[in-house]
Image: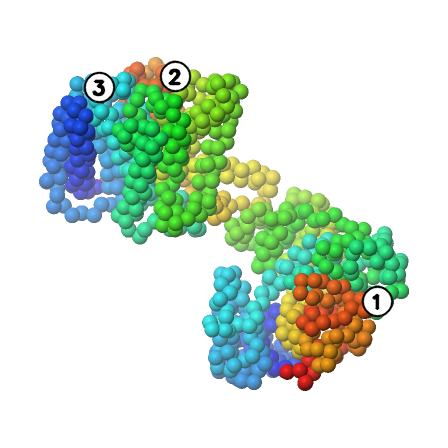
């Protein structure tokens, strides 16, 4: 373990992160909400801590090893989340306890979108802006993490696309150098954000809301500047449409965006098995939801059922977590169906959460293979994605991931029930945080404020687990990792 | 004609065999001198041992005044380089090469005169695959051969009791099927050719060759035998080149299962194929066949490279209830042996591939040659050139053409139009004429018929 090297990187990161407290100060000055002190304090504290960490180690020029990579990635999220909580904790508003501030910050940076704050509409604009920006930064981190860094550590859905997998996705290491890849993805991310903000603005949002919501849409986060989330704009259906489109786009593997952008055509999308499954699954759930809503006459007319149904399916399915109407009060099985769809989540290499579509697709194919093996005991049946066979190693790792996911899910669910949550709340809270979705059902449908502190910490852990594709975090907890 | 054949493998040997019997000067090059010795003992030809693409070896084989080289070694690269060498150093007029790898074939510009000067590319596996595919497409046919890019087909069927035409004169054919144009090109009864006339009566067990446009084939076949149900389920034994290609061609339209005994090979095949069920096991394993519902299988194709295994597994499949079985048989002697027994169709790869080469050996403008009845008969697609003064066929009605004995004109393709031959059909210049020659000895007469006189230059 190269502790000094890690310390240097962490110090750098913190100093970099401290600068993200500066834009909210500008916002504060612009709106004259008198809230700039919290950010100044946060900025100073973060910067100083960063300097203190960095200065003693800044001459160290050691190469990071694979193991250090895990530590850096995990620290990146935990430490930044802790320092990101500063502006929530120190100010007079929203007057959060430390637990709540940390929860909010974790939820932001992991792009989950679960909130403990109520009365968003009355918060100072600078703080609202800061929340949205946290999600945006988190989303950016995830893209770089998922596409560029995790594959190097050998973890994550993108691992499926690594060099050993033949086929069109072979060049999924998009450019030869990781910094170039990160830069390309950053441009796409920025491009998506700007177009999303413009679209929201043209559709009728105020500029402040448009930018804020674009931040949380493209990051598949789900924070809003209003208590009613997207429901605030329920009289403007075009905004919901814009949101649907950009949530869908952000849930797609960014490598596909990159390939399409570089090749100037749509073929990468059309030939990608994961993308096709993603669209198919969401469409099927949207159709079911729309008709069920219509038959139960939840909404007055069919178009409204179609719009709200589709919006909610895309929002939950991609694990964004925007809401227009309180979907937890929808009839019968719909809330549960939607919650389940969040387990599938977005595509690998997107800002979406959940287990990722590619894993779902592989599990499905594996299941079908077992069935046909019973019919044809002598058959040799490979598992293929997009016509290309996958090595058994990949399939094994997907099974391992799925089993661990379920096991940890059950464990956390039990923990939630230990502290006294009812079953629906416990289940949905764990699902919504582990899948980085946001709003749950029952007591956590709107806000997580009512949960006991212990539950909030556990859920913070769940968000981190989900965000880091479980194994990155679990590996740090294994004794073998720390053995010299 | 002076021909150099590179490679004394299966295709090379059968080519040499076929061509040597037609008064051609054949030289065979191979690196295996023992194999060459065997060949030389058996056939009237010359052999040269050495690497087939080396200029020195080619010169020793007489490349300087050769009319044609046929590169059929088992290496694509050797074949291509040999053609290049022959072109650059020896200016050989006709260069034919076997190129198997799909990757090369995807880029036809590679094989232009400026880059790799190969005049004709043959892919024996592809030819055999196409051949089997057509048989599966037309259940009941013994042979289906394409002319003019598939617009016209020559089909061989065995007449059975119950076919409406069996026991009737040929001329009643038109009354049976008013809308359908067809012509019976030859009839074989107990192994001997009959010259089909209007008053010839078709008997059961006759092997009838008829020519018709592709869309009419089914209707004509229904006249000669009870029509078989279209094929749905196919089992292929042997996942070699041919088996895999066939499965690939069949899988969009049929339910295909493929059996191979080589475990790593099955993995490769299963990755290559989309819908085919690839099974690992022995094709002659009764339990495996029963497990895979052999009794409901429409066609069982044994396509391994082992003749005996093919024959045995096909016989087993037939006994277990497969509706129709085919076996790939390389040895000519086995072909006769087997077709009288349980096996419905014996596929002889040399037979299926030789035709595409013969077209280039023949004089006159011959587009396509199909070798039939183990080389005894031939179906030829030739283009008529010249005018009624310089040519022996252009401007004449079919009844006025002095056809060699045992030769019939079956059809004429004019542009996109298919004309089934009648006695009064007049042949025009640039028509594609389809002839059926019962006796191979008459081929030179037919070649002469289509050569343009000296005055036409």
Q: Chain of mark 1?
A: B
Q: Which residue is mark 3?
A: A94
Task: Give whichever of discs 2 and 3 has the lower sequence position.
Answer: 3
Within 10 Å of the Cα at label 2, are there few (<14), some (14-19), or many (20+) other Cα atoms?
Answer: some
Q: Chain of mark 2?
A: A
Query: Label 2: which residue?
Result: A442
- Image-based side of A140 in relation to A42, left or right: right
Nearest to viewer (mark 2 / mark 3):
3
Q: How many marks?
A: 3
Name which quarter of the figure residue B66 lies in. bottom right
| Residue A394 position within the rendered picture, expressed as x and y whole percent measured from the top left | 42, 43
Q: Between marks 2 and 3, how big is the CA–CA gap?
A: 24 Å
Q: Position of residue B55 (x, y in %)?
A: 48, 80
Residue closer to the observer: B5 or B260: B5
Report whether residue A373 is seen. Answer: yes
The residue tagged 1 is B196
- Separation (CA) of disc 3 from disc 1: 103 Å
């Amino acid at each position: 373990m190269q502790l000094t090297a890690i310390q240097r990187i962490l110090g750098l990161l913190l100093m970099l992160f401290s600068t993200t407290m500066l834009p909210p100060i500008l916002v504060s000055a612009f709106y004259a909400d008198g809230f700039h002190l919290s950010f100044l304090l946060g900025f100073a504290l973060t910067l100083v801590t960063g300097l203190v960490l960095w200065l003693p180690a800044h001459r160290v020029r050691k190469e990071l090893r694979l193991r250090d990579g895990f530590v850096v990635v995990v620290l990146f999220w935990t430490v930044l989340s802790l320092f990101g909580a500063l502006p929530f904790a120190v100010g007079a508003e929203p007057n959060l306890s430390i637990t709540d501030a940390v929860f909010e910050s974790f939820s932001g940076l992991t792009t989950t979108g679960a909130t403990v704050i109520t009365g968003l509409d009355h918060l100072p604009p600078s703080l609202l802006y800061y929340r949205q920006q946290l999600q945006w930064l988190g989303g950016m981190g995830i893209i770089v993490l998922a596409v560029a860094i995790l594959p190097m550590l050998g973890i994550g859905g993108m691992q499926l696309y690594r060099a050993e997998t033949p086929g069109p996705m072979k060049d999924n290491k998009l450019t030869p150098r990781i910094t170039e890849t990160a830069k390309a993805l950053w441009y796409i991310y920025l491009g998506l954000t700007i177009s999303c903000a413009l679209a929201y603005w043209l559709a009728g949002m105020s500029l402040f809301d448009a930018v804020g919501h674009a931040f949380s849409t493209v990051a598949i986060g789900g924070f809003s500047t209003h208590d009613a989330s997207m429901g605030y704009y329920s009289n403007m259906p075009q905004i919901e449409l814009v949101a649907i489109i950009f949530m869908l786009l952000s849930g797609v593997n960014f490598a596909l965006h990159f390939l399409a952008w570089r090749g100037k055509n749509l073929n990468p999308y059309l030939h990608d098995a994961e993308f096709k499954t993603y669209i198919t699954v969401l469409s099927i759930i949207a159709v079911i939801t729309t008709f069920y809503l219509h038959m139960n006459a939840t909404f007055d007319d069919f178009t409204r059922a179609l719009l709200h149904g589709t919006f909610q399916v895309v929002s939950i399915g991609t694990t964004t977590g925007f809401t227009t109407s309180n979907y937890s009060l929808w009839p019968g099985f719909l809330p549960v169906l939607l919650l389940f769809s969040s387990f599938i989540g977005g595509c690998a290499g997107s800002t979406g959460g959940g287990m990722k579509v590619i894993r779902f697709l592989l599990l499905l194919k594996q299941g079908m293979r077992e069935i046909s093996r019973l019919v044809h005991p002598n058959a040799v049946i490979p598992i293929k994605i997009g016509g290309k066979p996958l090595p058994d190693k990949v399939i094994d790792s997907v099974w391992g991931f799925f089993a661990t996911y379920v096991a940890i899910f059950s464990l956390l669910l039990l923990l939630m029930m230990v502290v006294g949550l009812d079953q629906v709340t416990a289940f949905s809270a764990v699902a919504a945080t582990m899948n980085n979705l946001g709003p749950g059902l029952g007591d956590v449908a709107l806000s997580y404020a009512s949960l006991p502190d212990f539950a909030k910490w556990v859920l913070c852990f769940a968000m981190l687990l989900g965000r880091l594709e479980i194994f990155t975090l679990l590996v740090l907890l294994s004794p073998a990792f720390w053995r010299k | 004609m002076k021909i150099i054949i590179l490679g004394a493998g299966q295709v090379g040997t059968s080519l040499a065999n076929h061509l040597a019997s037609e008064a051609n000067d054949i030289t065979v090059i191979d690196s295996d001198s023992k194999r060459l010795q065997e060949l030389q003992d058996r056939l009237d030809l010359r052999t040269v041992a050495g690497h087939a693409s080396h200029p020195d070896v080619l010169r020793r084989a007489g490349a300087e005044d050769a009319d044609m080289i046929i590169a059929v070694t088992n290496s694509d690269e050797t074949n291509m380089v040999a053609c290049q060498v022959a072109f650059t150093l020896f200016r050989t007029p006709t260069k034919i090469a076997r190129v198997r790898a799909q990757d090369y074939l995807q880029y036809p510009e590679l094989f232009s005169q400026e880059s790799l000067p190969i005049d004709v590319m043959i892919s024996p596996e592809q030819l055999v695959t196409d051949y089997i595919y057509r048989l599966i497409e037309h259940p009941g046919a013994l042979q289906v051969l394409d002319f003019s890019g598939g617009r016209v087909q020559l089909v061989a069927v065995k007449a059975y009791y119950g076919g409406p035409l069996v026991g009737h004169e040929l001329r009643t054919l038109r009354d049976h099927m008013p809308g359908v144009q067809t012509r019976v090109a030859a009839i074989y009864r107990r192994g001997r050719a009959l010259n089909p006339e209007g008053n010839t009566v078709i008997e059961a067990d006759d092997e009838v060759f008829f020519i018709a446009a592709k869309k009419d084939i089914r209707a004509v076949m229904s006249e000669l035998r009870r029509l078989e149900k279209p094929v749905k389920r196919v089992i292929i034994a042997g996942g070699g080149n041919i088996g895999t290609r066939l499965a690939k061609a069949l899988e969009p339209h049929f339910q295909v299962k493929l059996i191979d005994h080589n475990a790593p090979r099955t993995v490769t095949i299963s990755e290559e194929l989309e819908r085919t069920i690839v099974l690992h096991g022995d094709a002659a394993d009764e339990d495996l066949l029963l497990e895979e519902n052999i009794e409901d299988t429409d066609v069982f194709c044994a396509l391994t490279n082992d003749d005996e295994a093919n024959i045995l597994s096909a016989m087993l499949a037939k006994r277990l209830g497969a509706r129709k079985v085919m076996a790939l048989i390389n040895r000519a002697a086995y072909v006769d042996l087997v077709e009288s027994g349980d096996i419905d169709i014996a596929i002889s790869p040399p037979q299926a591939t030789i035709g595409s080469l013969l077209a280039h050996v023949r004089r006159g403008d011959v587009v396509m040659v199909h070798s039939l009845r183990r080389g005894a008969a031939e179906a030829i697609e030739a283009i008529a050139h010249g005018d009624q003064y310089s040519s022996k066929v252009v401007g004449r009605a079919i009844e006025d053409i002095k056809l060699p004995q045992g030769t019939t004109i079956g059809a004429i393709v004019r542009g996109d139009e298919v004309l089934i031959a009648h006695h009064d059909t007049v042949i025009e210049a640039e028509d594609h004429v389809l002839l059926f020659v019962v006796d191979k000895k008459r081929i030179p007469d037919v070649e002469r018929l289509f050569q343009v006189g000296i005055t036409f230059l």
